[in-house]
Image (cartoon, rainbow, N blue to C red):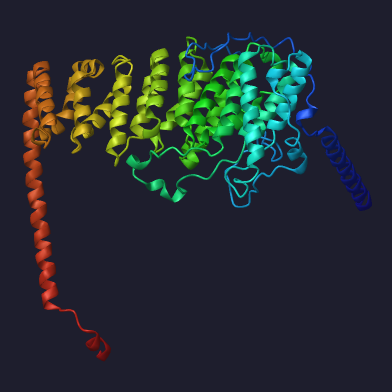
Amino acid sequence: MPKHNSDSETTAHDTQQQKSAQLLTRGTNSSTTTSPSSFSSPPPPSSSSSCQPLAPVSKSTAHCDQSTKENVNGPVTSLRKPISPPLKASSPGHFKRASSDLKSPRPSEEELKLFSQPLPSLRDVSNPNELKALFLKKLELCSVQFDFTGPYANVFEKEKEIKRKTLLELVELAETKSGIFSPETYGPVIYMISANIFRSLPPKAQPACQAEAPVEELEEEPRPDPAWPHLLPVYTLFLEFVVSRDTDPKIALEYIDKSLIIRLLQLFDSDDPREREYLRTILHRIYAKFMPLRQFIRMAIANVVFHPFVFETERQNGIAELLEILGSIINGFSLPLKLEHKEFFHRAILPLHKPRTLVTYHKQLLYCMVQFIQKDTSLAVPAITTLLKYWPVTSAKKETLFLHELEEILERVKSEVIEPILKPVFHRLAKCMSSKHCDVAELALVILGNNDTILDALERHREELMPIIMGPLIENSFHWSTNVHELTQSLQKLLLDMDPVLYEERMRRHCVESDSEKISRQVMNRRWSVLEDRASDNNDERPFSSSKDTKGV
């Protein structure tokens, strides 16, 4: 029996080795290297993909189209599921921040030979076949990468200028001539774009140890990219390719895939605001034209950008631009909201209130919040609960942003909707009302005195809610700010007109409670003074001995 067991184990081990060898061989045979000249015509699209091309969009349009309507069918995908396999380091769009062990790109000798032979201008070619062949050659030339920040930044100046002029020529052709984007050019165009824009971004302007800087100092000066004169025509050509009528989304979907979307999202961390602006426009056009990618784009924004930003780094430059895209997308959601959209609100939008850099993107975040609550008022309760959970303690500027957002939410719902959380809301407003910062106190008083939802709730639940704000309201009569003092008096008059009996009763009870608190405080101070006197007497009776006396003992 023992011999039989060892033979069976050896056989199983050999079988496992054979399976592993087959898998390795299969993976080696299936892997191919992509180059500009290796693109071929893609296979015909499947019949299940139904996506109509959009009308042409002017390249000067810098703002997102807010008329995009949602039409995504399919199962609800959890945000916690992996959205894509990890990128290979050999891919042209491999993304990572610059580091000391990263080699600077230097063109090879074969690539430099492309610049030795001048190509004719695209304007001088009239034959369509010759024009397409020349277009592909110029795409191959523009796929050569140069260094603009490392040790080769001042080298190959002639080749860089030739490439820049060629890129401008390609952009001019795409803008003036129709039919230039045919299915056989999709691959070379995307390859050239990927080779140029997917690069190593420079390191952050401030190290991670400076993350504890004050909130007022978080807005940094824009850092222009030295390679922007070459990146601008590439992004312009990318935008022309996406919005062109000649680009068939069914066929182009093979090249504008999920991997490219992930790498585009990673580029939103660029320090150059001009690049982020182009990325915002291009990603939104892709979302509008390539309908099968819509659900994936939303999930990728949450998983690739938002979650690492909120729970890990708290440093990301493109949050505001991505929220602008999402604001336009949310505006197009159909009613009633799908479960997937509500899940996105809870897991992607609400956690963005946590980072201390909220001041840099709060305007865009507030727009997304308002869009969601207008479509489903039941989302106001988790939204306000999240605000109370992440309410700032030491930053008055961030506290004013939270108060503004709370006011915007309350203006769009009725008091019955927020009835389960009325007491926590009034407790928070009472604390803000007694703040020594005049802006925080004024905003809290304005919400309590002018918001219809708060006044209606106070009218229906005055016995429970009025005692919460009476104490800070009386204490604010001695506030140092004149505006706060005037708003306090107007709110006191409003409460008096609402229920004079209850108001007078609460005033008397507050006076009694304040008197008893003063008495207890005086008693406590006397006890502390007695203890201090006894401690001083003990120190006088037993003075501290010197070091010499201690050694003698």
The answer to whether any part of residue 464 appears in the image is: no
Q: Residue 350, position in %: x, y?
A: 43, 28
Q: Position of residue 303 (x, y in %)?
A: 55, 31
Say above or below: 218 vs 131. below
Q: Is residue 249 above or below residue 88?
A: above
- Number of marks: 0
Vertical placement of residue 405 versus 57, above or below:
below
Q: What's the residue at 58%, 24% (across, down)?
A: 236
Closest to the observer, 495 or 63: 63
Q: In the picture provided, is 381 more to the left or to the right than 501?
A: right
For this rendering, which residue is in front, 484 or 249? 249
Task: Place residue 503 in its image quadrant.
Answer: top left
Residue at x 41%, y 26% (from the top left corner): 365
Residue 294, image quadrant: top right
Q: Quadrant of residue 266?
A: top right
In the rendered structure, the answer to whether residue 401 lies left or right of residue 347 reads: left
> Percent position (x, y) of residue 309?
49, 37
Q: Quadrant of the C terminus?
A: bottom left
Query: Horizontally, is 443 left or right of 374 in the view?
Result: left
Work out which residue is located at the far bottom of the displayed protein and give it. 552
Residue 232 x/y as whole percent = 56, 29
Q: Residue at 67% of width from left, 9% of height from top? A: 50
The answer to whether one can see residue 156 in this image is yes
Q: Nearer the viewer, residue 240 or 45?
A: 240
